[in-house]
């Protein structure tokens, strides 16, 4: 009889999945955390969280860093030529000081309406899309919007490091956080949970968690959406360009490679294999940062900026049946300092995407992990100090902001020292 020897990582995944199926509890462990995606052309030093081998991770990072050209389907309208152009500080996949532009207007009933942009000397239209791309492959393709669009908003590029763990959070966990907020605050703070389509599982929906409006629930859907909207490259999940002006390629433009994967598959696999953003352990160990951590909890910041979340057990089927949580991502404790829910904290941009009109002035709680490298803050990057960013909070967060105002100068500096350690 021939005997086959399975790789250790696969054995672990099979055992974990079997335990989950049998209902046997798995012990939660800390998710690995490191800035392990250095900006090297050869991807040296890229270290996976265990979802893939380091070699596969490095190869996927290389795809994430590839620049698209006209022959690859870039445009006709776009914001960047590569994923890394907008996800890069301090490592590949992290945050950036790049923004995109969203616009729209209100109807007579006060409801948000997506604009109809024009191009090609006003002979072409790009309807029902709030995103206005900043670049085009020819002058005729450039989008133009009229003075009718009175709502204008900037959106910062988000961090994608650790997003494999975020994807692996059970939807019920997010719903429970929302319910706990309601009871803890008497309904003053109550995160909105929305269900959004999973593109790779037609007809299926899942609780959204990616994007400023929680418009995506899976990393493969997120990849396809970003590829067509930010770079203008179509794929099997987003097969149609927003405009054909100056277009020379045929949709879909993201080809299957020899390994049977499209670029969007490599993007999703790269994000799933990233480690979580790490703390600055030196700063975190200081007495000021430790005192600030206590203040962060006591004045109410952690109600929305949730300190710890545990992902679903390995073997859990998610994304409408399209993905099974592996051992590398399952039952992992992460510290995102976010609830991944939508809230109105007085900073909403008025834009509606997947969540309906109720979400117009709601934004996803910013995950604070890795945020110490940011010099421009909030969703629109218009605040430049942590103090100003905190004081900008209102709406649901008004009471928490007032608690911060009541702190002494020393206490405020301690809380900010804590934030600078994240």
Image (cartoon, grey):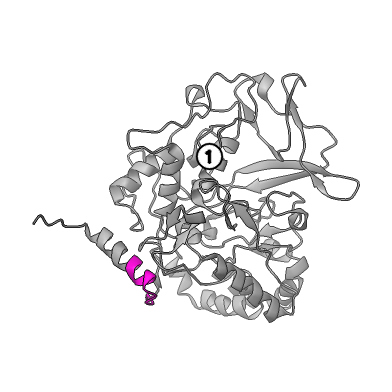
Residue 21 magenta-highlighted = yes
Q: Nearer the viewer, residue 97 or 354?
A: 354
Residue at screen point 49% across, 29% down: 253
User: Residue 42, can we see it?
Assistant: yes
* Percent of width and height locating residue 344: 74, 62
If the image is split into quadrants, where does the N terminus sit? bottom left
* Percent of width and height locating residue 93: 47, 48
Q: Nearer the viewer, residue 271 or 216?
A: 216
Residue marked by disc 1? 237
Q: For this view, does 307 lie left or right of residue 46?
A: right
Residues in magenta, as a range: 17-27
Q: Residues within 10 Å of mark 1 (few under 14, many from 20)?
A: many
Residue at screen point 73% across, 78% down: 406
Q: For this view, does 272 lie left or right of residue 215?
A: left
Among all residues in the image, which is located at the extreme right?
108
Residue 20 magenta-highlighted = yes
Residue at screen point 59% across, 53% down: 375
Compared with residue 217, is residue 83 higher up or lower down, i.e. above or below?
above
Q: Secondary structure at mark 1?
A: loop
Marks counted in the figure total 1
Among all residues in the image, which is located at the extreme front?
1
């Amino acid at each position: 009889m021939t005997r086959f020897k399975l790789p250790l990582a696969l054995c672990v995944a099979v055992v974990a999945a079997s335990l989950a199926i049998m209902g046997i509890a798995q012990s939660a462990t800390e998710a690995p955390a490191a800035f392990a995606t250095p900006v090297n052309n050869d991807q040296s030093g890229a270290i996976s969280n265990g979802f893939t081998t380091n070699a596969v991770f490095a190869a996927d990072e290389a795809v994430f860093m590839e620049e698209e050209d006209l022959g690859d389907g870039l445009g006709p309208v776009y914001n960047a030529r590569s994923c890394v152009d907008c996800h890069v500080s301090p490592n590949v996949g992290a945050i950036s000081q790049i923004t995109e532009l969203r616009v729209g207007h209100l109807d007579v009933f006060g409801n948000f309406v997506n604009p109809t942009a024009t191009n090609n000397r006003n002979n072409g239209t790009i309807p029902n899309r709030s995103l206005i791309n900043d670049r085009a492959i020819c002058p005729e393709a450039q989008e133009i919007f009229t003075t009718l669009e009175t709502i204008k908003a900037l959106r910062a590029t988000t961090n994608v490091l650790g997003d494999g763990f975020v994807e692996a959070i059970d939807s019920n966990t997010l719903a429970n956080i929302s319910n706990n907020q309601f009871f803890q605050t008497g309904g003053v703070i109550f995160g909105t949970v929305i269900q959004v389509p999973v593109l790779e599982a037609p007809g299926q929906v899942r609780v959204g968690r990616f994007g400023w409006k929680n418009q995506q629930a899976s990393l493969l859907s997120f990849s396809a959406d970003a590829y067509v909207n930010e770079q203008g490259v179509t794929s099997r999940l987003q097969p149609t360009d927003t405009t054909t002006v100056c277009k020379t390629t045929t949709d879909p433009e993201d080809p299957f490679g020899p390994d049977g994967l499209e670029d969007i598959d490599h993007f999703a696999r790269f994000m799933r294999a990233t480690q979580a953003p790490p703390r600055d352990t030196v700063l975190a160990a200081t007495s000021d940062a430790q005192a600030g951590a206590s203040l962060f909890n006591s004045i109410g910041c952690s109600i929305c900026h949730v300190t710890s979340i545990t992902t679903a057990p390995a073997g859990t089927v998610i994304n409408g049946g399209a993905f099974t949580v592996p051992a590398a991502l399952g039952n992992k404790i992460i510290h995102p300092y976010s609830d991944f829910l939508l809230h109105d904290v007085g900073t909403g941009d008025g834009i509606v995407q997947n969540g309906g009109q109720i979400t117009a002035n709601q934004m996803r709680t910013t995950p604070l992990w890795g945020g110490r490298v940011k010099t421009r803050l909030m969703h629109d990057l218009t605040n430049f100090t942590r103090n100003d960013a905190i004081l900008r909070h209102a709406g649901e967060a008004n009471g928490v902001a007032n608690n911060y105002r009541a702190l002494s100068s020393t206490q405020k500096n301690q809380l900010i020292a804590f934030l600078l350690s994240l």
